[in-house]
Amino acid sequence: MTSTLFAGIGELCTCEPTLGDGSALGLVHDAAFVAKDGRVAWVGRVSDAPATDARVDLGGRAVVPGFVDSHTHLVFAGERSAEFAARMAGEPYTGGGIMSTVAATRAATTDELRANARRLLAEMHASGTTTVEIKSGYGLDVGTERRILEIASELTSETTFLGAHVVPAEYADDRGAYVALVTGEMLAACAPFARWIDVFCETGAFNEAESRAVLRAGIAAGLMPRVHGNQLGPGPGARLAAEFGAASVDHCTYLSAEDVVALRDAGVVATLLPAAEFSTRSPYADARALINAGVTVALATDCNPGSAYVTSMPLVIALAVREYRLTPAEALLAATRGGAAALRRDDIGRLAPGFSADFAVLEAPTYVQLAYRPGSALVAQAWRCGERLTV
Ligand code: NIG
Ligand code: FE
């Protein structure tokens, strides 16, 4: 099999502390690495590089692991710019607009949904994302949830069934019947296309007992749990995530000190979504409290048409540095290794021997520019499994 040397790397962020300078980012300067069969086979200084079949020179640029965007809602139709404008004029975000996206999504053809998701995925690739998780949740009937997950599973192996996003209007008077549908016929139709079960555990969405029922049924169907929790206010989401051994609880805008301890003790990743807080003008999560407690933190976009119509992980990194006061190194780790941990993946998120050769080449001498130059298109190239994703 062909081996390729990627050389001419001014600064390589391996995100593996046993490599390079011994920092958490495992930095190597004047670096190179070898990709073989889609995986990293060797990492080091270019002067020590082994012979390979091919060589790509990256012109002194910085290289980081491809971003792992572990929380998106990419399959939907329509947009909600009027809702965003109203919010910026003072309206609060309540999640109430979800049903307008559900109506548009139900009315869209599968080809239209697929084309929209592919368009957004192309934006993600262009900004350095090489792994993406995609949730359902804008169908809320058996046929549309299944269609969404079929499309999602064409685009990624990290697919999540979120039939429990909100109770659709037609079940407003019989919530129990909707939970029975989600945990019964809808789950059976969707589970073959999903790896994860998720529930929006929040006032206005699903309460603790309903969320428990959803998670229990999903686990019984062979899916692994993750939770949307503590986005709009304090609540049981994080605690349930800990109790169910979820891979991640996502949002975490309103966590109590007890929630933080429960997440740490249960080894649940806290996935923070600063673009949602930015776009809904919400308070920012207390990322420092989580890190100080020893909770693994991930950063993701939450790309969706309501609370965060954002595809750019560099923007998310910049927000995390500015608003969560993470160091640029902490933010990069959360966007790579953290995302991998949130998806329970041990093959992505680092540029170390054995890991997938997934990486972004920056039009910059250092990864710090991801936060330092917000709004500039700093990703020059993205590669996955040693193959170029972008031109
Ligand atoms: O993750 N929290 C729930 N769901 C989405 C937003 C959905 C919407 O407003 O359309 C989120 O923020
Ligand atoms: Fe979400």
Image: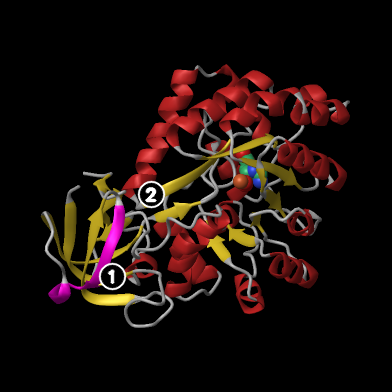
Q: Where residue 211 appears, x then y in whole percent?
A: 80, 43
Q: Residue furthest bottom?
A: 22
Region in magenta: 39-48
Q: Earlier in the sequence, mark 1 or mark 2?
A: 1
Name the residue that disc number 2 marks. Answer: 130
Q: Where residue 168 appears, x then y in whole percent?
A: 74, 28
Which corner quadrant holds the C terminus?
top left
Give above or below for 157 relative to 341: above
Question: Taking 146 as reference, is 61 left or right?
Answer: left
Residue 49: which disc? none
Residue occupying image coordinates x 52% and y 26%: 150
Q: Nearer the viewer, residue 328 or 243?
A: 243
Name the residue that disc number 1 marks. Answer: 12
Q: Residue furthest front?
A: 1
Give above or below for 384 relative to 111: below
Residue neighbourhood size for the residue with mark 2, other residues' Cα within 10 Å, grouped as few (<14), some (14–19), many (≥20): many
Q: Nearer the viewer, residue 188 or 226?
A: 188
Q: Is residue 47 rendered magenta in the image?
A: yes
| Image quadrant, ligand 1 | top right
Check disc 1 and give the amino acid type: Leu
Chief secondary structure of the magenta span?
strand
